[in-house]
Each structure stands twice: as structure tokens, then as C-alpha cells.
Image (cartoon, rainbow, N blue to C red):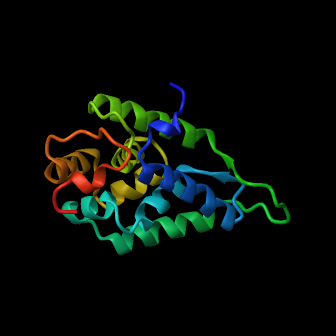
Amino acid sequence: MAIRLDRFTVKAQDAVQSAVELASASHHPEAQPLHLLASLLAESDGVIKTLLQKIGANQGQLAAAVSEELQKLPKALGTNSAPAFASSSTRLLDQAQTIAAGMQDQFTSTEHLLLALSQSAGVPQRILERQRISPADILTALKSIRGSQTVTAQNPEGTYESL
């Protein structure tokens, strides 16, 4: 499936852009799924913080674990080129779109990105697993936040309860 960012919510588009900016600022040659997880955790007014609170995750420990892993990524110093989007990140966005479609959502949102991160083998999934955040936990918390609502607009967060 081709990645169509126009079918992502505004917050999801912002998270993708923030991930690329974080990779650039960190001198990483590629924007990886770990950058996307970091950008989701940095989101101040979206559904991710609420989801993690409902799960009971220690967000400070989670952010520290992500930061520690980001420090381990290779750096490309001396270049002014923008980081490439890693193939693993492209696969992750594709998986998030598939998750959204499976949930009958018209747009891919940040919660779909978090679900994809929790299901994709790699460092972000291992970090989430170590923090006892499973895909089932995310889905349960999401159901309590948005009930049976689906994502039918590019700005759905305002319609969710308890945000």
C-alpha cells in the first residue's frame, strides 16, 4: 500500500514531520521508527499521553528509555543533507494505515502509529514491551477513550471523551 500522508490526521502528520526533524537535529542519517516513538511521546495535547496514562505507563521511564536508545544511533556529522526516511519507517507507516483500515477508520492517527510501533519487531516494540505496554493494552485504553467512534476527520481528538 502506498503511503498517503493526506490520509493521516493532522497530529499523525505532525508526528512524522517531528520524527524527521528530530533525526536531523540529532545528526542521524535516517528517520527511524524510534524517532517516531520519541515524537509521539513528546506530543503535548494529543491522545497518546492519555492512552499511556490509562495503561498506567511510567511516561518518564518510557521517554528516558527512548532517549537512551536514540543516543546509540549512528551520527552523520559534516553533512547538511536531510535525513532519509528509513525503509523500516515506511513499513511502519504502511502498517499503521492497515491498522486504521482494519478499525474502520478513514484516517491514520497517532494511536494507529503507536499500535504499529507496539507490533513491529524492533527497538520501539522492545521498549514498549519492557514498559509493559502491549497492543492489547493500547486497544483497551483506546476503546475507553474513544468508545465506538471512528476516525472520520483529520482532527478527531476533539471528539474523544476525556481529552
In the rendered image, which quarter is residue 151 located in?
A: top left
> Could you tell me which residue is drawn at 52 percent across and 39 percent down?
5
Expressed as whole percent of the image width and height from the top left, the position of residue 15 reads: 48, 55
Outermost top residue: 1
For this rendering, which residue is in front, 54 or 160? 160
Expressed as whole percent of the image width and height from the top left, the position of residue 150 reads: 24, 39
| 70 to 112, vertically: above or below | below
Determine whether, in the image, residue 81 is placed left or right of residue 163.
right
For this rendering, which residue is in front, 151 or 95? 151
| 69 to 83, vertically: above or below | below
Outermost right residue: 78
| 53 to 97, vertically: above or below | below
> Could you tell me which residue is drawn at 60 percent across and 63 percent down?
22
For this rendering, which residue is in front, 128 or 103? 103
Expressed as whole percent of the image width and height from the top left, the position of residue 26 reads: 66, 67
**Mark count:** 0
> Could you tell me which residue is drawn at 78 percent across and 60 percent down?
76
Determine whether, in the image, residue 93 is placed left or right of residue 147.
right
> Could you tell me which residue is drawn at 37 percent across and 47 percent down?
118
Expressed as whole percent of the image width and height from the top left, the position of residue 74 reads: 70, 60
Quarter placement of the C terminus: bottom left
In the rendered image, which quarter is residue 59 located in?
A: bottom left
